Amino acid sequence: MLWIGTSFKMTKTRGEAAEYAARLRHGVGRSGIPGVQPFVIPSATAIAEVGAVLGIESPVLVGAQNAHWADSGAWTGEISVLQAADAGARLVEIGHSERREHFGETDATVALKVRATLRHGLIPLVCVGEGADVFARGGSVDHVLAQVAAALDGITDTSSVLVAYEPVWAIGEHGREPRPEEIEGVHDALRREWGDRVAAVLYGGSVNPSNAKALLEVPGVGGLFVGRAAWDISGFLAILSTAAEAAAV
Ligand code: PGA
């Protein structure tokens, strides 16, 4: 199964997200895409809207971009896993590099959030990745393995966990599209260490319809996590159809 998803990050009104969801529902159809598990992660404001438009039986999973580890309480500005689930999320993105960089997310808070997500039966999507400096000195594998180990430390059953390897130097507007061979080492290491224990390891960072095929061919890549290139529904549908072809091989 190839997991193919997008996070809207801080984009789209509820109306825009609903329109996107309607076109996604049409593109994916009722029975979905064989061999592909699509998911979409809107802003918290639009989770319920997107879920409602996709419909309860949708083959597309809806997620939240973040959730707190506590079930409720005095945590102004946060939403809990329970609240995300109540809005319709079945997956929680945890530890994206933008949250680590700008919002003080650490390996310790990531681990707490993974546990809270599993406790409530949602799927944690754990994002890991090294910065340009670590990449330049050849430390990517150690860095990423340490992040995953910290996130999943002490959890006996990690079989529902998704890991997204997202090198920080490849993410976003200032990111650089990787050559497939640049991500091979980390994916190989993740496959050896975690391949049997997690649901899938995805790649993310400057994925687009032109490079999706080559990235999916990297051994150990079990899906793609896409930002900008999927914010227009045609981009997401193009990547989904590339994945459908890859899954059919
Ligand atoms: P990008 O974002 O595809 O826009 O590089 C990826 C991500 O942050 O997950």
Image (cartoon, rainbow, N blue to C red):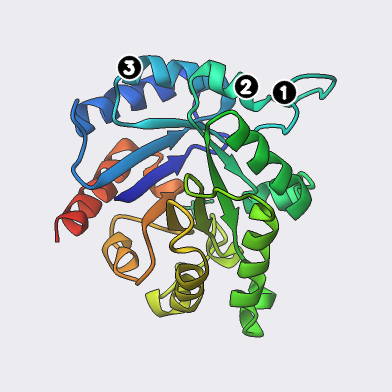
Q: Secondary structure at mark 1?
A: loop
Asked if ligand 1 lies within 8 A of label 3, the reply is: no
For the residue marked with disc 2, what is the amino acid? Answer: Leu
Badge 2, how many Cα within 10 Å: few under 14, some, many 20+?
many
The residue that appears at 34% across and 25% down in the rendered structure is 21
Q: Which residue is mark 2?
A: 82
- Between 231 and 167, the residue placed more toward the observer is 167
Residue that label 1 marks: 71
Outermost residue to the right:
74
**Element assignment for label 3:** loop
- How crowded pointer 1 is (Cα within 10 Å; few <14, some 14-19, many 20+) is rated as few
Question: Percent x, y for residue 1?
Answer: 29, 50
Q: Quadrant of the C terminus?
A: bottom left
Residue 79 located left or right of residue 91? right
Q: CA distance from mark 3 to mark 2?
A: 20 Å
Image vertical order of residue 2 relative to residue 186, above or below: above
Establish if 91 lies above or below 206. above
Q: Residue at x 69, y 76 (%)?
A: 133
Which residue in the structure is indicated by mark 3? Answer: 55
> Which of the two discs, 3 and 1, labels the residue nearer the N terminus?
3
> Comparing marks 3 and 2, which lies closer to the viewer?
2
| Residue 130 in the image: above or below residue 123 | below
Q: Are marks 3 and 1 in contact (CB under 8 Å)?
A: no
What type is the residue that disc 1 sits on? Asp
Q: Position of residue 13 (x, y in %)?
A: 50, 22
Under mark 3, the amino acid is Gly
Q: Secondary structure at mark 2?
A: helix
